[in-house]
Image (cartoon, rainbow, N blue to C red):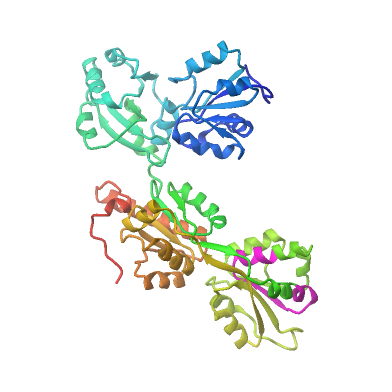
Amino acid sequence: MSSDSPTSGFVAFVGAGPGDPNLLTLRGAELLGKADVVVPGVEAHRSLLRHSRPEVEVTEGDYLGHAAAGRLVVRLCEGDPMLFSSVSEEVAACAAAEVDFEIVPGVPSATAVLAYAGIPSAMSTPEFRVVDAAREQDWASHAACPGTLVIYNGLPEAVAIGKALIGGGKPDTTPVAVTASGTTTEQHTVVSTLGRLQADLKHAALAEPALITVGEAVRMRNTLSWFETKPLFGWRVLVPRTREQSQALSEQLVSYGAVPEEVPTISVEPPRTPQQMDRAIKGLVTGRYEWVVFTSANAVKAVREKFEEYGLDARAFAGLKVAAVGDATARALIEFGVRPDLLPSGEQSSEGLVDEWPPYDSMLDPINRVLLPRADISTDTLVAGLTELGWECDDVTAYRTVRAAPPPAPIREAIKGGGFDAVLFTSSSTVRNLVGIAGKPHNVTIIAVIGPQTAKTAEEFGLRVDVMASKPSASALATALAEFGAKQRSAALSAGDTPRKPSQNRRGARRRAK
């Protein structure tokens, strides 16, 4: 049975795809969003719960009772529920119990994993054959397959299967690819031939789920591989930021093949006393200031929240000049409805802003006051620079930055033990706070910083800076790390070596910061 909007007891068998959670179908996501009960099936499927309501019930037990009581149940299935799936008995049980059900196809591993491995499933081949090794015994019958042969559940018997195919007449030079953990950032492909399969798999340390692909299409991998060749493929990257700031950066890192891990090091809190900000907002509205300077997106957020508290909006900035430091700050202002009048054209810092700030001129500027809503730990560089130019500054604490609680023990151990491939520092405070709550990153970990001041702080803590952003923005920092990773990969390939992640060099000699 199928229903667009199930309203009574119902079980949906949803294909979860081959591993990449982004390959879930739209129908699958829709049903997860409506589900009362979700049965994940395997641990990896729990990542798909982000599509579900917060109050959804997650169970591994008998779910027919829930459906019989009128609840919508989503049973997540690996790959496609109708292809080599073990849920046929569960579907039959629903039918026998007269419980309505729907089967939602999923992206099958047979095509998806090959695509992620850079192997065409049916390009220029006369046949595409999929076999389940758990059910197949007569491998010689598949030796005559003129196209691509894809084998599920065959890793434990891969060598024996290869010998059987050769025995059935398949040339021992036939290309073979064995891909484990396909479509995930743990994906690893070993390319071999039927004759060399035993030797090449001996030290590969592959595990199920895995697919074996046999046929000439495997040769196309050198040209079509796109997933495992991403610049940061499989890199575990530490993102020590405030949680609300890290989403866009993490998404960008994922696009480069990385596995970002967000570890909050800073908690942003309101000022201890609100009176100073209250006076500043009142002065902004009544014309006390000529300029307002925002040095962070958090400052914009703090002022915006005060505006909302007083029933104000962006129109209160009419007649004021607004300056901003950094792309993220400018974006936050534009989202608020305020377009900055001044942005540093060079270095995005307080120093860069002062370099371009006009000196006070009593003939041109009716008011000589500047409002600076900032963090409680801001430096005096900007105030000193503007004061020297003849401006009077109201330096107001808009928010406080507080060191976050230490991360769980496994994270701390990974930081100090070299379990992370890279760490991104987006400010000096993230350096200080990460070292304070979790310890100093291992010397094999690539240290990437957003700018010179952050680099200086990192070096003061004995860290070797490997990567610096071309401009002080989180996006530029992620791009710089990806370019670094691409160069490392290219250098390894040029030397005839297999590219390695930094964390795989833990036993190697890496230069420590002096």
Residue 177, placed above or below residue 303 = above
Q: Where residue 232 appears, x then y in whole percent? A: 40, 50
The front one of 80 and 361 is: 80
Q: Where residue 35 appears, x then y in whole percent? A: 61, 30
Residue 445 lies in quadrant: bottom left
Residue at the image position 64 percent from the left and 61 percent from the top: 332
Q: Where residue 161 appears, x then y in whole percent? A: 26, 21
Residue at the image position 45 percent from the left and 31 percent from the top: 42
Q: Quadrant of the N terminus?
A: top right
Residue at the image position 57 percent from the left and 56 percent from the top: 244
* Residue 293 sits inside the magenta stretch: yes
Residue 423 lies in quadrant: bottom left
* Residue 194 sits inside the magenta stretch: no
Q: Where residue 187 appears, x then y in whole percent? A: 37, 38
The front one of 482 and 93 is: 93
Q: Is residue 468 visible?
A: no
Residue at the image position 44 percent from the left and 66 percent from the top: 431
Q: Quadrant of the C terminus?
A: bottom left
Residue 137, placed above or below residue 46 = above
Residue 146, placed above or below residue 223 = above
Residue 269 lies in quadrant: bottom right
Number of numbered discs present? 0
Residue 425, placed above or below residue 221 = below
Magenta part of the chain: 282-304
The front one of 123 and 324 is: 324
Is residue 469 left or right of 345 when viewed as pictured? left
Is residue 392 left or right of 471 when viewed as pictured? right
In the displayed image of the protein, which residue is found farthest to the top? Answer: 96
Q: Is residue 369 visible?
A: yes
